[in-house]
Image (tube, grey):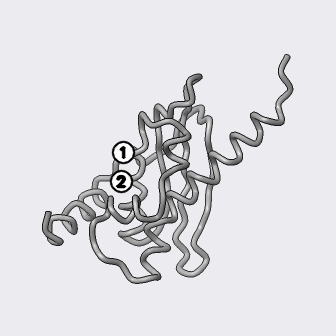
Amino acid sequence: MSVAMYQDNILDHYEHPYHRGALETPTLDYRDLNPLCGDEVRVQARVDESGCLVEAFFEGEGCVISLASASMLMEAVEGKTLAEIKAMERQDMLDLLGIPLTIMRVKCALLALRTLEKSIHLYERAAAETPIV
């Protein structure tokens, strides 16, 4: 794919985001922001009993890169296990975008992934602390 095609894909996700909105009963729910630029994203997801992420939605305000990467991430993680999502790295997110980014824009691109990772951490910590009845 050429850079122009990737740019078109980014604009498409920004203008017509995948699963932008809120879930009625999320299993995961976390809001985070990039204090350097003010971008903010809330990620909500539903995890089934086998540990698969079956629905993922986001809400937020921010730049094109931040919101397009959130849309791309929601599309990419649906159907994955929490373990697969936790294994995602910086480069995986940058590969989804497919264009070179400055350091400041990398932070924008990673906001949704970092938010999703934090929500998974909180979910797993709460599950570990819940007594088995």
Q: Nearer the viewer, residue 7 or 83?
A: 83
Give the CA distance from mark 2 to mark 1: 5 Å
Q: Is residue 80 left or right of residue 5?
A: right
Crowdedness of circle 1 by 10 Å Cα count: few (<14), some, many (20+)? some
Q: Residue at x 33, y 62 (%)?
A: 95
Q: Is residue 56 above or below residue 15?
A: above
Image quadrant holding the C terminus, namely top right
- In the rendered image, residue 61, in percent from the top left (x then y), is placed at 48, 65
Q: Is residue 110 above or below residue 87?
A: below
Amino acid at pointer 2 = Met
Residue, disc 1: 75
Q: Nearer the viewer, residue 101 or 21?
A: 101
Q: Residue at x 78, y 35 (%)?
A: 128
Q: Residue at x 48, y 65 (%)?
A: 110
Q: Quadrant of residue 51?
A: top right
Of helix, strand and loop, which one carries label 1? helix
- In the rendered image, residue 7, in percent from the top left (x then y), is placed at 22, 68
Residue, disc 2: 72
Q: Is residue 113 above or below residue 120?
A: below
Q: Is residue 111 left or right of residue 32?
A: left
Image quadrant holding the N terminus, namely bottom left
Q: Is residue 108 left or right of residue 17?
A: right
Which dot marks residue 63?
Answer: none
- In the rendered image, residue 27, in percent from the top left (x then y), is placed at 62, 35
- In the rendered image, residue 119, in percent from the top left (x then y), is placed at 63, 48
Q: Nearer the viewer, residue 68 or 125?
A: 125
Q: Residue furthest top?
A: 133
Q: Are marks 2 and 1 in contact (CB under 8 Å)?
A: yes
Of helix, strand and loop, which one carries label 2? helix
